[in-house]
Amino acid sequence: MSSLNTFILKLLLLGVMSTAGLAITAPRGLSHELVPTIADMTVLDAQSVVLDFRINLEAFLAGVDLDAAQNTDDDDAGEAYTTLRGLGASELRARVPQLVDLWNQARLGEADGALVFGITRVEVPEGLSEELPRISLLTLTALLPEGARNMTLNWPDGSGALVLRQQGVDAPFTGYLAGGETSPPIAFAGGGAQSLSEAFFGYIPVGFDHILPKGLDHILFVLGLFFLSARVRPLVWQVSAFTLAHTVTLALGALGVVSINPALVEPLIAASIVFVAIENVFASGLNPWRPVVIFCFGLLHGLGFASVLGDFGLPEGQFVPALIGFNVGVELGQLTVIAIAFACVGWFARKEWYRARIAVPASCAIAAVGAYWFVERVFL
């Protein structure tokens, strides 16, 4: 093997091992998973607009970059977040005006000019363990200029995902905004519901985002499939079984037909990562029963995706196209992971040393991460 190839392999394995190390050494007590913000918009007698937020106030006040971070350990502001998470409800409420001032300066809402929002209500849950994220209720109200018929919402950079839902009208607007994006004009009288195609294409990036970059557990599972064999036929069998299975439970979970506690699903997802990775070490090819096992694991992963959609909500009038769009985004994310893996190591796949020097060590690192996650999700 050439010195260049050896150097590339060392870099690859160093990256895999570093990922495992970061996952294993992350302090559980400081880690809080971040969820999208949800805002319900209501217009009262054409005179004022009300925004009701379900929001992680600590993340916004600490300055966590919600566009990039999946949990508070992913951001330099994690320590500030932990400090705020330890505050009592009254202490946290006292800090909310500074957030609203920043939003007003950023022209959060515009209707024939910038709207000035004031705080109507702040409800901060009490009695939760500090190990858990705290989702508060924040209500803002702004007076509307006379004759205003619509408004746009400017979601600031770094604010992460926002699900914006119009209330109290026919054919209400429902939209998904990433940090730094602006909504289309939302008519106060309603009628701004997304078309079927808009819902479909709008939810593709949502599904993709929950694979790349945020779905590390799903990424590792797909890589576990890849490292069994980089040949196309075994990979197609495995990915097809996985895709079919998680499509079924994603649909059933999103429809509310099937519901399983995430406290059970998440450890089992971690266990599935361990299984496929360890089997890669002992099996050099596709066993006849492996697609069946992967199908069963795919059912679990579909339930995990369904919990993501539960956080976002799906627009009622466009449920089916939005669900399909999300699933297409997930598949595109998985195919991108496989394409990146092929680009990095696929050209070594026919070498005699590929399995011993790439596939087995990488699978061991993946198994180590999955095993740590299983222990963390069950016992810590």
Image (cartoon, rainbow, N blue to C red):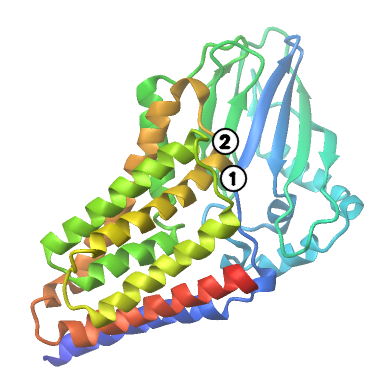
The percent position of residue 140, horizontal first and vertical second, equals 77, 31
- Could you tell me which residue is drawn at 67 percent across and 25 percent down? 41
Q: Amino acid at mark 2?
A: Val
Q: In the displayed structure, does residue 85 sit left or right of residue 355?
A: right
Q: Quadrant of the N terminus?
A: bottom left
**Mark 1 lies on residue:** 36
* Image marks 2 and 1: residues in contact by CB distance under 8 Å: yes
Q: In the displayed structure, does residue 158 sit left or right of residue 284?
A: right
- Could you tell me which residue is drawn at 20 percent across and 89 percent down? 6
- Could you tell me which residue is drawn at 76 percent across and 9 percent down? 45
Q: Nearer the viewer, residue 294 or 314?
A: 294
Q: In the displayed structure, does residue 209 sit left or right of residue 312?
A: left
State which quadrant residue 104 falls in. top right
For mark 1, does the 10 Å Cα neighbourhood hold few (<14), some (14 to 19), or many (20 or more) residues? Answer: many
The percent position of residue 108, horizontal first and vertical second, equals 66, 34
**Mark 2 lies on residue:** 163
Q: Nearer the viewer, residue 185 or 90?
A: 90
The secondary structure type at the circle numbered 2 is: strand
Above or below, 202 against 208 in this view is above
